[in-house]
Amino acid sequence: MNLDDKKTKMLDLAERLGLPASEYADTLDNLQLNRIHIVDMLPEILLMIRSVVAEKTLIYKRKPIDIVKKGLLFSFHNIFNPYLDEYQQHNEEKTIQVRPHIRITPFHLESEVVFPSGSTITQITILIELDFLKNFIGKDREVFSYLFNDEKTLMIEEFMSPEMADLVNEIAGESVLGTLSDAYYKLKVLELLYLLFKNLSKRQQTIYQSLHSDEIAALYRTRDAISSSIVQPLTQDELVRISGMNPFKLRKLFTQIFGKGIYEYSQYLRMQEAARLMREKNFSVSEAGYQLGFSNISYFGRLFEKHFGMKPKKWSAQYRLKDQ
């Protein structure tokens, strides 16, 4: 598929998803579109696989989606990156890699679509009709009733499990075309949703409440500050100032969106970064711990074991064996 065909395909889908193409067709030249593949199985499921690089920061307002009357939008961000072209390969150190995550939003939520300057955005997006999803979950749907409440405006973000990352890589591989291609993608989407809902069932319990757009923006501003300060975590006072909320409200709504308390979220990010340093940079356990601001390596080791289920030295050795 040539570049013009990719852009046309993306514009057509954007129109259907509440982003009028006429409002941003001219700015599409600032997005390097490496991959787009759409599998339309509506009214039940629509799947999009997309990989883009933004040359400058672009922000678009997404209106409520009315392609299906009621449903949820699942976006799996930055899990795979198999489509690096020559431009990206020469600029890997300069590009901003957004941390992998999954975002869940209802169709009626107006939201912003942001492509930060210099960032590589790779994602799988799934639109799914609400009754179809409820039937898929079956008798356990009450556990996730907060997602199905039309009277509340919620946004949920979840971390990626290794199982989900592997499956997304598989889905994002070479496009499956021809006979039974829809059946293939439908099975893979349902498998991915099963793994996601298994993760969601482990979230910290909280009472879910409707959110205003300014509250969502404040919570993401806080999340971004935490993500940018994993070596030296910010204090509660600093986070309160960044969010503009009182401590109780900040803790409650942060847990609602991200499924973890602020401290647990920060520690999770630190352990993920430690794992990355040992896996990609060949850091020793001590080097990784010191790099992340831990003066007590024994404490760092216990924290790592709590998150990954094994001591960091054993984890690192296991990963090196896999790579050989």
Image (cartoon, rainbow, N blue to C red):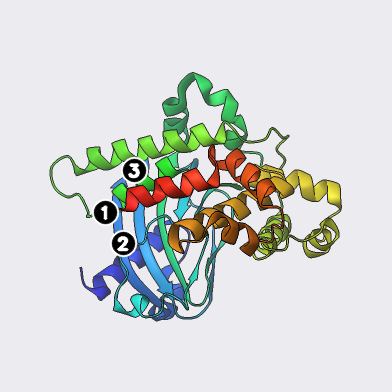
Q: CA distance from mark 1 to mark 3?
A: 22 Å
Measuring 29% from the left and 78% from the top, which residue is drawn there?
A: 86
Q: Quadrant of the N terminus?
A: bottom left
Q: Residue furthest left?
A: 179
Q: CA distance from mark 2 to mark 1?
A: 8 Å
The image quarter containing residue 17 is: bottom left
Amino acid type shown at disc 2: Pro
Estimate the x, y position of residue 129 in percent, counting from the top left.
43, 38
Mark carried by residue 222: none
Q: Residues within 10 Å of mark 1 (few under 14, many from 20)?
A: some
Residue matched to label 2: 82
Q: CA distance from mark 3 to mark 2?
A: 27 Å
Q: Earlier in the sequence, mark 1 or mark 3?
A: 3
Measuring 36% from the left and 76% from the top, which residue is drawn there?
A: 88
Mark carried by residue 42: 3
Residue matched to label 1: 173
Amino acid type shown at disc 1: Gly
Question: Is residue 259 rendered to the left or right of residue 199?
Answer: right
Callout 2: helix, strand or loop?
loop
Estimate the x, y position of residue 126 in percent, counting from the top left.
41, 47
| Residues tagged 2 and 1 counted as in contact (Cβ below 8 A) | yes
Estimate the x, y position of residue 115 in percent, counting from the top left.
50, 70
Amino acid type shown at disc 3: Leu
The image quarter containing residue 11 is: bottom left
Q: Earlier in the sequence, mark 2 or mark 1?
A: 2
